[in-house]
Amino acid sequence: MIALGTIYGTPLAAILPQDWESTFTAMGYLGLVGIVFEGGLSTNLALLLNNLPLSLLCATIGVVLPIALSFALLTGAYGYTPLESFAAGAALASTSLGQR
């Protein structure tokens, strides 16, 4: 479906009208919300609470460590601004959280 949207949509052929593209995008977002909601409904709460401390520790390390290393290396060694260093660290942090 994504390949068809890419081929027939704006990126390549631009055959689909803009209204249709907007409608399909909205439907895709609704589907994504539905999948996330279904995942929340099927979560085992006892298992979640048992693993909560370890999960919070892993998530904290996955966010704080890339940002801290980016600040230390990019600001200190290469002279980037703090905002640029934070942006690079935030990009790395979101990537590391996606792997969990």
Image: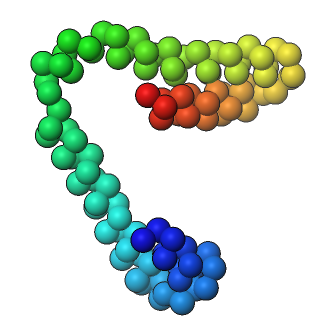
Locate the C terminus by quadrant: top left
Q: Is residue 90 left or right of residue 88?
A: left
The location of residue 33, given as percent across then percent down, is 28, 53
Q: Is residue 4 above or below residue 89?
A: below
The residue that appears at 42% across and 84% down in the rendered structure is 19
Viewer-proximal residue among 92 and 82: 92
* Residue pictured at 34% horizontal, 10% vertical: 54
Q: Residue at x 64, y 15 (%)?
A: 68
Where on the picture, by quarter, is residue 51? top left
Q: Position of residue 82 (x, y in %)?
A: 72, 25
Q: Image point 86% across, 23% down: which residue?
A: 79
Query: Coloured how?
Result: rainbow
Query: In terms of image quadrants, where is residue 42?
Result: top left
35 relative to 14, above or below: above
| Front one among 98 and 79 | 98
Left/right of residue 15 with respect to residue 47 in the rendered view: right
Tell me: 98 left or right of 55. Answer: right
| Viewer can see residue 83 | no
Tally of numbered discs: 0
Residue 23, position as x, y percentages in the image: 36, 76
65 or 80, nearer to the observer: 65
Q: Is residue 69 visible?
A: yes
On screen, residue 77 versus residue 93, left or right, reads right
| Quarter in which the N terminus is drawn | bottom left
